[in-house]
Structure formats: C-alpha cells, structure tokens
Image: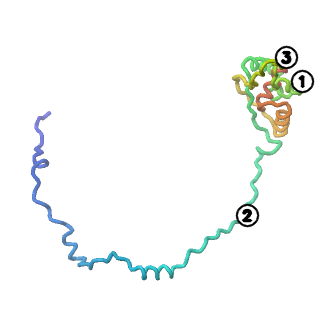
Amino acid sequence: MSTERPNLEAAFGAPKAALPDRAAGAGAALGKRPPRSTEVDRETVGAQLATIEPPKPVTIERTPRAAPKVSRANSRGAVNNVAVYLESTLLARAKQELRQKDITYDTLAVLAFEHVTDEALAKHFSQDDPSDDTAMPLRAKRRRGEAGIQVQLRLDGNQRAWLDAKQASVGAPSRSALVAAAVRLYLLP
C-alpha cells in the first residue's frame, strides 16, 4: 500500500475568479418588459364577475341495481362450521364417547339435546340467589365459561336456527355455551 495521497489543495483552496453569469445573455433575447400594475380595477373585476354564470348542479342518473345474489352459504340447507368450546375434562369424555359409538361431534350434540330437557338447561343458565330476606342481597355473578378447546360442529341452516331459538328460550349466553352445557349434562350428569 502506498502512503501517497492526492493533493486536495485545489478542492479546499481559495476560489477562482467568479464564473460569468450564464443567464445574463437571456435578458437581451427576451427583451425588456414594462412593469406590471399591481392595483386592481374594482369596476372591471365586478363587470367580469357579473358575466360569469353560476355552475349548474351536476345530476347523476342512477340505474337500478339487480338484487344481490343469495349465496349458498346463507341458504337454509348449507352446511357451515359452528365453533364450540369444551373444557378439557369434558372434551376427553366426549372423545371417549365418539370412539365408543363411532359418531361425530355434531351427532353427539344432537344426542345431548335429545336426552337433556329444557328445564335442566334453563336451570344451568339461571342465576340462583341463595340469600334470604334478612341479609343484603349478593351481587349477581355472571356465569362465565371456562377456558376450552375449540371443536367444530358441521350444522346446516335449520340446525343453526333451531340452536338460536333454543339459546333464546333457555337464556344461554351463546350457541357455544348452550351446546357445551347440553353435552356436559349428557355425558357428566
């Protein structure tokens, strides 16, 4: 490696003579312009504004749209997934039942609803008030679901509508809670 370095004196030295103005010659080519007046003649501007017509409103013609097509997913016969959360102990018992009877989760849910009464489900979701009239009533505790593992039920539209009606009639907070309670009451009485 060489220790010789280029001489940078020219780059950092005193400036050379000023370069000639490149735009100086353009003035002669363009010629001299008279100075422009910056004052506004209000009468002239007012007359010009009076001749301008106001803009016409824009009208947009709307064409009627065709009704949206109903997808097969929205129809009553379409099969969709419905998520249900089961506690780990209940899930283990449900898997045992599935293997023994060789059925699916949706069939297990149908069997559970056949064997569990509406009264038992309503009692499961009701708020019991054990206090008596002499003591201050306790604040109503909201029944919370426990952490669970998700399983998918394959239900058609009629089954989902039936579940929604059953959920409203027994006071369940969700479809998942309703199915989990029915399976629990069926498998773990």
Mark closest to the chain's N terminus, 3 or 1: 1
In the picture, residue 59 is in which quadrant?
A: bottom right
Mark closest to the chain's N terminus, 3 or 2: 2
- At a point 73% along the width and 64% down the height, the residue shown is 64
| Dot 1 amino acid type | His
**Where is mark 3, residue-wise?**
189
Q: Position of residue 177 (x, y in %)?
A: 77, 28
Q: Secondary structure at mark 1?
A: helix
| Dot 3 amino acid type | Pro
Viewer-proximal residue, 138 or 31?
Answer: 138
> Disc number at residue 115?
1
**Compared with residue 42, is residue 130 higher up or lower down, i.e. above or below?**
above
Q: Position of residue 182 (x, y in %)?
A: 83, 25
Mark closest to the chain's N terminus, 2 or 1: 2
Q: Secondary structure at mark 2?
A: loop
Q: Disc 2 and disc 1: Cα gap in Å?
A: 52 Å
Drawn side of residue 132 relative to residue 84, left or right? right
> Disc number at residue 37?
none
**Where is mark 2, residue-wise?**
64
| Dot 2 amino acid type | Pro
Q: Position of residue 108 (x, y in %)?
A: 83, 25
Q: Are the residues flagged by discs 3 and 2 in contact, CB closer than 8 Å?
A: no
- At a point 78% along the width and 22% down the height, the residue shown is 137
